[in-house]
Amino acid sequence: MLLVGKMAIDAFLGKKLWSKRSATFMNLKAASILPLPHASGASRWLNDPTNAARHDQALSELSRLRVELGL
């Protein structure tokens, strides 16, 4: 499940420090969840090189899973 943006992340995972969990796969009950920053560019989270690297790694993992699951 992709959660895109703070509103979706908070709705599913509760209000916690968003920047610490974004772009990090997690398992919640029977679902794999990947929270990502909103693509609008309003978030400056990706300006930090560490966060940008986490984001790139998460997207790579998402691509790998897409191929693995035949989606």
Image: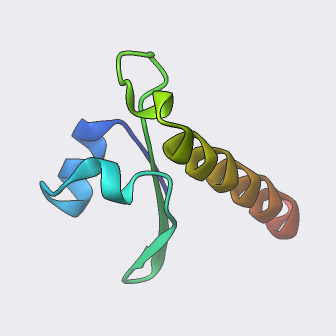
Q: Which residue is located at x 87 percent, y 60 percent? A: 67
Note whether 38 is above or below 4 in the view shown: above
* Residue 17 placement, left or right of 69: left
Where in the figure is residue 17, as x and y percent of width and height? 20, 54
**Image quarter in which the C terminus is found:** bottom right
Residue 69 image point, x, y percent: 80, 68
Does residue 71 sit above or below 69 in this rendering?
A: above
Q: Could you say where residue 63 lies in the image, as x and y percent from the top left?
A: 78, 53
Q: How many marks?
A: 0
Extreme residue toward the front, this view: 49
The residue at the point 85 percent across, 69 percent down is 68
Q: Residue at x 55, y 38 (%)?
A: 49
Pick the residue in front: 30 or 26.
26
Where residue 57 appears, as percent x and y from the top left, is 68, 54
Q: Is residue 17 left or right of residue 51?
A: left
For residue 25, above or below residue 35: below
Asked if residue 12 is positioned above or below residue 59 in the image, the reply reads below
Residue farthest along the bottom direction in this orientation: 29
- What residue is drawn where x is 81% and y is 61%? 64
**Quadrant of the rendered image containing residue 15:** bottom left
